[in-house]
Each structure stands twice: as C-alpha cells, then as structure tokens.
Amino acid sequence: QVQLVESGGGLVQPGGSLRLSCAASGRIFSINAMGWYRQAPGKERELVAAITSGGSTNYADSVKGRFTISRDNAKNTVYLSMNSLEPEDTAVYYCNANLITSWGRTYEYWGQGTQVTVSS
C-alpha cells in the first residue's frame, strides 16, 4: 500500500513563486523516479519535471529555467520550486512516482493533485 500526498498549491500573482511537496509513504523498497505532471482545463496531462533517485532531472521546455525539481531520498519526498510563474502555469499539478514495493513489484502511483492558480 503506497500513498502520495501533495501540498503547497494555491493562488499566486504572475511573477510569484510556489513550492510543491509530495511525500510517498507505505511499503516502499526503493523509488526509481518521481515527477510532476500538470493538467490545465481543456488540455491533456503533461510532464513538467522528473527526477531519478540518483538526481538526474528532466524538464518540459516551457518551465526550464523557472522550475526546479529536487528530492529528499531519506524522506521519499519530491519538491517542485516554481519561480516566475505565469498564467499559463495554471493547472492541477499531480505527483507521480515509479517505485518498487517491499515485496518486489514495480508500480506507478499518482497523487491526488493540487491546484496552482496564477492570476492578478
């Protein structure tokens, strides 16, 4: 049993910053990678950023240079620091984890989503 719990969303003005957190808990043996996806109204869910347990990162072109993904392996937690936010960043942000459970199976899990709204 694995759960991903997200926090940190909210309303922010253009140019502002937010930091999202996602903590994975349960019978986890190891985490291969964690990432953030987002889905805006009328659009498909898209990858925002991802990070492996070793620290390799990948970003969508639209957020590169503005967002930073990081993780605390000891806490099974991933963060998304969002700077210079734009109205186009408004979406529901979902945490994702690819992990191996304590009984040896690889699964992909999703968080419940947290709303980020960028508006004046």
Image (spheres, rainbow, N blue to C red):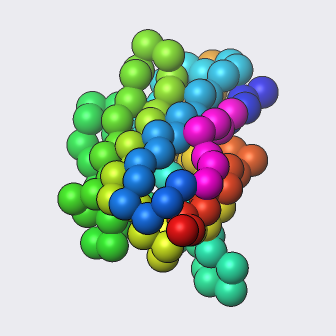
Q: Quadrant of residue 27?
A: top right
The part of the chain drawn in magenta is: 5-11
Who's the residue at 31% across and 46% down the image? 68
Who's the residue at 63% across and 49% down the image? 10
Residue at the far top in the pictured view: 74
Q: Position of residue 24 (x, y in %)?
A: 61, 28
- Is residue 118 highlighted in magenta? no
Residue 14 visible here: yes
Q: Position of residue 5 (x, y in %)?
A: 69, 33
Q: Position of residue 71 (x, y in %)?
A: 38, 30
Q: Looking at the figure, which quarter contains the N terminus?
A: top right
Q: Looking at the figure, which quarter contains the C terminus?
A: bottom right
Who's the residue at 61% across and 54% down the image? 11
- Is residue 6 highlighted in magenta? yes
Residue 34 visible here: no
Who's the residue at 74% across and 47% down the image? 112
Residue at the far bottom in the pictured view: 42
Q: Is residue 67 left or right of residue 18?
A: left
Q: Quadrant of residue 21?
A: top right
Q: Position of residue 66 (x, y in %)?
A: 28, 57
- How many numbered badges does the structure rendering display? 0
Q: Is residue 17 left or right of residue 26?
A: left
Q: Quadrant of residue 92?
A: bottom right
The foreground one among 62 and 14 is: 14
48 up-or-down from 42: above or below = above
| Main secondary structure of the magenta stretch | strand
The foreground one among 19 and 37 is: 19
The foreground one among 65 and 34 is: 65
83 up-or-down from 8: above or below = below
